[in-house]
Amino acid sequence: MTIKRLTLALAATLSLTATGAALAQPAAAPAPKVTAQTPAPKLIVMIAVDQFSADLFAEYREHFTGGLARLSSGAVFPSGYQSHGATETCPGHSTILTGSHPARTGIVANHYFDLSAGREDKRIYCAEDESVAGTSSGNGKYAASVKHLLVPTLGDLMKARDPRAQVVSVSGKDRSAIMMGGHQADELMWLDPKGLTSYRGTTLSPTATQAGAAIAAAIAQPRPALTLPADCAAHDIAIPFGAKGATVGTGRMARDAGDFRRFMASPEADGAVLATAAALRQVRKMGEGSGTDLLILGLAATDYVGHSTGTEGSEMCLQMMGLDRELGDFFARLDAAGIDYAVALTADHGGHDLPERNRQNAWPDAQRVDPKLDPAELGKEVAVKLGLPQPLLLGDGGDYYLSKALTPAQRKAALAEILPRLRAHPQIEAVVTAEELAAHPVSKRSPDVWTLMDKLRASYNPQRSGDFIIALKPRVTPIPEPDMGYVATHGSVWDYDRRVPILFWRKGLAGFEQPNAVMTVDIMPTLASLIGLPVDATKIDGRCLDLLSGPESSCR
């Protein structure tokens, strides 16, 4: 669904300005140049594009003509970093509006294990309340919650200063809406097969309800194949994978009626989020009051495309063109409202292509992870050999957790058997224990020169991280057997997963490019300074980025 289609559907029921009328405005006079004396913007728009790596931004930048082209004319930091090692969705989103690494936010991974949890399923989803009876992240029936985020967000600080400040968070995924929306959002929602949803027991506002109904109606309709732009022709190469003769790389994003997964893996999903946000802004009159409001957008389609088909096929090219178009339509609606707004855009992590295409494109050593590194399988083998209780080892991603039922002697014996095995494995770069990470200080250096220990330490929280953490070697994809819908991923300590663009734009802001490394934890203090909101620098990991080219500074 495009932002135009959803806006027209909502206009009939919510008395909104229809897209056609809203965009047919005469050209406005040039805005005065933004200086240190310019008043704070009335609206901050924070956009996170899931899996929008610095590599994708660089590859497609010259092809952008819409919203991403506009943002590229502002303050551009092409070498931004999700500096930590656990480059997953939840940790990455937790850094963007908190100014803090996952070590401080407590969001160490999408899932971690709490062996003391009062339920059989010890696997904890980053955005759930595991204390709710009858819920489990293992079967997907969990109670979404912000309880695991240990620090305030920009929106929380804005609400603490002025309770009248409005904070609205709309996303394709619950974890991005929650981690950026924080604890005090006025409205917080995400896409689901029925349109939009929020926390259990929460009633969506009339505007969100109508938007959800329009989105559900769109999902229920089939989508024909998209036309491949000429700019995408070079990406249109079939790549075989797996043992069943399947291929990716030549998809056109056709979708059967009701196929929610394919809806999410297309510009339709981003258009739905953007149109909903535009409608909520208009109805709530965000950016039209005496203070500053915060509108948060989590665009998830790029991530779904990356996982489903990789980063270098026709599918991703269609997604990049669609994302640029949808953002352009969204900004045009904001322009038509006549409000003073500032935009920041980044990503929760990067990503890399599936190894089958990497091997065809000059990287013959790309490979899939050895299934024997699975914690459950490894733990069972060691437990049988040493006569230890099972399950011995739990894990999800890089964190491995030893059973709490072990005696000190058994724990020592288990580690003595497991660690040398892992360290000798040809696909493993390093194995680091919790004790080693706890003794390592969080780095204050530029993220482009961080050591592997620096990266892992920024993701380490003693209450939630594993007993030891493994890091795979570069270009080892942690998917042992690909299938349709899951062929490529992210999550490594390497720069293709850490590097993301960081873009700022405001009407009248003189554009410049700064290629030196900055971090996503710098975004919150930068935006806080833009609106004159004091932040205790001792309680965050980021710093304010000066957005004014020249001798003046936006860092107050």
Image (cartoon, grey):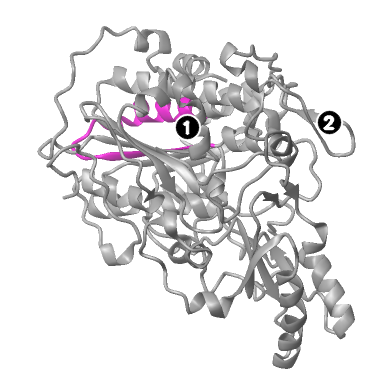
Picture layout, residue 338 above or below residue 206: above
**Residue lying farthest to the bottom in this orientation:** 409
The label shown at residue 58 is 1
Query: Where does residue 231 sit, x and y in percent of width and height?
Result: 56, 15
**Residue nearer the viewer, 143 or 435:** 435
**Residue nearer the viewer, 324 or 153:** 324
Within the magenta stretch, is there residue 335? no
Would you identify the image quadrant in which residue 137 lies?
A: bottom right
User: Which quadrant is the N terminus positioned in?
Assistant: top right
Q: Which residues are magenta?
A: 273-299
Q: CA distance from mark 2 to mark 1?
A: 29 Å
Query: Where does residue 209 sit, x and y in percent of width and height?
Result: 52, 31
Please give the name of the residue rendered at 78% of the width and 62% of the height, measured from the top-left corner: 374
Q: Nearer the viewer, mark 2 or mark 1?
A: 1
**Residue wearing tag 2:** 246
Please give the name of the residue rendered at 75% of the width and 21% of the height, measured from the top-left corner: 256
Tell me the SS state at disc 1.
helix
- Of labels 2 and 1, earlier in sequence is 1
Query: Where does residue 335 sit, x and y in percent of width and height?
Result: 30, 20
The label shown at residue 226 is none
Residue type of the residue flagged with mark 2: Ala
Picture layout, residue 330 above or below residue 168: above
Tell whether 109 sits left or right of 378: left
